[in-house]
Image (tube, grey):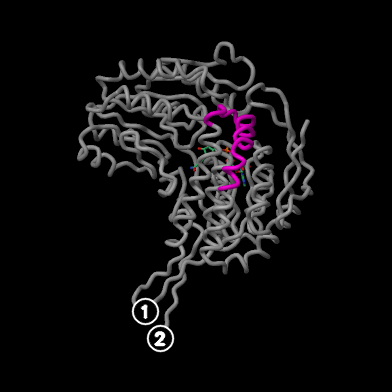
């Protein structure tokens, strides 16, 4: 069995000092297939020192130098797309085609977005007699999750490099094969010390957040993880940017085409087996359309059964099954499609039946909780006000969607939604537009100019005469 036991420090792939080990199973078969080691305090310390040593020179580089590095990184990811897609398919379970297009493909667009926005991000501003210059925030700790492992890392690495920061990345412990490829690519394309990687778990991540040589923390993951990181960062008053979970809603208005709207929402909601932070997992339709819409969503979900990958791990499978079985027992909730257990013929691995519920209760657990699995809920609303209240009615606020033909009505609804990403009539994701949430979906903004700004501090310079 392969053991992943390396870090990237000072431009070199080195053996981890840490000896704590974890055995991982393939989501596709459930069989143990690789081991990973977790970085310890010494690994974290070496990586932070490397980032600090590289900061003085990297922070002084010009836009062209940074752009060339970011473009080289994007090109190398493009070149290695097949290997990356295969690793993510094997580790996360994302079906091969989607792994290539989204898991390996999206980071390339995100990085090229940073290259495009670099000049704007570095341009000084004039405010009366002051020149405001945007300076790198310093050495960044970047902690990322497993669901889109390469994309989440590149969203931070590209932005931090563009800002002139150096960093230590602590990727998810559940994707060591992807992490190993990523380290190879970073070693080939980025100047030594600018991007260091210490694979490990929450303990490794916590050591990184606590390290006095880290100036800012950028975290993507669960609400629980985000809370722990924010509390730890508060001890040293490090700025801490959080990208957390979601329970996003799509509002279908009575004049929308249900066939198109429901299909797009189901496809998006089930993408990566629902392990997408922006998944539109709550489908809101006018009361009169609930029965028809639920039947359509159920039929679409059934059809997806053989096309979905598994969820990532036994823990995740058990967590998702817990949500489904509790919802099946909830009197205010009706099961429309799927349900507990494995899909027929997919008893191996962590495959989950795409599951659809209708809920009459806006406070039901299945309506409020982030399942992070292929589980959708359809709910009815009376008027536009109620649709907005339901859409905004969770602890989260990451994404939302509106479907309708009256542009003024759609705009009026959109203006009241408390979500960082709002798609109208199925508009595609924009890898240069700011990405982030309200409420417990977190405080950060990633991608494009806004993503670079996260890693900058404005410095005001006043000159006389
Ligand atoms: P997680 O919180 O368990 O872990 C995320 C990362 O943080 C991992 O690298 C983990 O090792 C590390 N970590 C966990 N606890 C830590 C601690 N106390 N100190 C330092 N590091 C710690 O999340 P996950 O299960 O990997 O990812 C799934 C979650 O991520 C979901 O809730 C999903 O919605 C969210 N997510 C959000 C976004 C976004 O951009 N808003 C994107 C993708 C995923």
Circle on res. 129 = 1
Residue 90 part of the magenta segment: yes
- Residue hosting label 2: 464
Circle on res. 14 = none
Report the residue that reaches farthest toward the top: 344
Report the residue that reaches farthest toward the bottom: 465
Residue that appears at 64% across and 50% down:
186
Q: Residues within 10 Å of mark 2 (few under 14, many from 20)?
A: few
Taking 73 as reference, is 181 above or below it?
above
Image position, residue 299 (x, y; %) = 40, 15
> N-terminal of the two: label 1 or label 2?
1
Q: Which residues are magenta?
A: 75-98
Taking 373 as reference, is 82 above or below it?
below
Taking 166 as reference, is 291 above or below it?
above
Does residue 89 appear left or right of residue 288 in this picture?
A: right
Residue that appears at 79% across and 43% down:
19
Image position, residue 452 (x, y; %) = 48, 57
Q: SS for tag 1?
A: loop
């Amino acid at each position: 069995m392969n053991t992943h036991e390396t870090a990237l420090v000072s431009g070199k792939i080195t053996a981890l000092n840490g000896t704590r080990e974890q055995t991982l199973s393939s989501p596709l078969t459930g069989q143990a297939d690789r081991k990973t080691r977790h970085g310890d305090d010494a690994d974290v310390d070496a990586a932070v020192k490397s980032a600090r040593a590289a900061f003085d020179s990297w922070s002084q580089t010009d836009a062209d130098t940074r752009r060339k590095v970011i473009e080289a990184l994007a090109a190398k990811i493009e070149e290695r797309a097949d290997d990356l897609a295969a690793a993510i398919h094997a580790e996360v379970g994302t079906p091969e085609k989607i792994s290539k297009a989204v898991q390996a493909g999206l980071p390339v667009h995100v990085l090229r977005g940073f290259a495009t926005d670099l000049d704007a991000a570095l341009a000084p501003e004039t405010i009366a007699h002051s020149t405001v210059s945007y300076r790198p925030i310093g050495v960044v700790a970047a902690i990322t999750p497993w669901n889109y492992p390469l994309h989440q890392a590149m969203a931070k690495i590209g932005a931090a490099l563009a800002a002139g920061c150096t960093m230590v990345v602590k990727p998810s412990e559940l994707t060591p094969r992807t992490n190993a490829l990523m380290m190879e690519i970073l070693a080939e394309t980025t100047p030594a010390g600018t991007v260091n990687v210490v694979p490990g778990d929450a303990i490794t991540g916590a050591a990184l957040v606590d390290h006095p040589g880290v100036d800012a923390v950028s975290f993507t993951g669960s609400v629980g993880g985000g809370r722990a990181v924010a509390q730890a960062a508060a001890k040293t008053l490090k700025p801490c940017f959080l990208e957390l979970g979601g329970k996003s809603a799509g509002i279908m208005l009575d004049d929308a085409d249900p066939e198109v709207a429901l299909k797009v929402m189901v496809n998006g909601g089930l993408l990566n087996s629902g392990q997408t932070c922006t998944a539109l997992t709550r489908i809101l339709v006018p009361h009169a359309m609930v029965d028809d819409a639920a039947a359509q969503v159920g039929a679409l979900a059934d059809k997806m059964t053989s096309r979905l990958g598994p969820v990532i791990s036994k823990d995740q499978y058990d967590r998702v099954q817990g949500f489904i079985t509790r919802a099946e027992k909830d009197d205010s909730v009706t099961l429309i499609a799927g349900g507990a257990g494995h899909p027929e013929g997919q008893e191996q691995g962590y495959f989950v039946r795409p599951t659809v519920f209708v809920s009459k209760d806006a406070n039901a657990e299945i309506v409020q909780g982030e399942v992070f699995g292929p589980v959708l809920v359809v709910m009815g609303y009376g008027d536009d006000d109620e649709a907005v209240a339901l859409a905004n009615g969770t602890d989260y606020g990451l994404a939302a969607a509106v479907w309708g033909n009256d542009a003024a009505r759609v705009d009026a609804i959109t203006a009241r939604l408390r979500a960082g990403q709002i798609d109208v009539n199925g508009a595609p994701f924009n890898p240069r537009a700011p990405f982030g949430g309200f409420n417990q979906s977190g405080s950060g903004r990633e991608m494009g100019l806004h993503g670079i700004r996260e890693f900058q501090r404005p410095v005001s310079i006043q000159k006389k005469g």
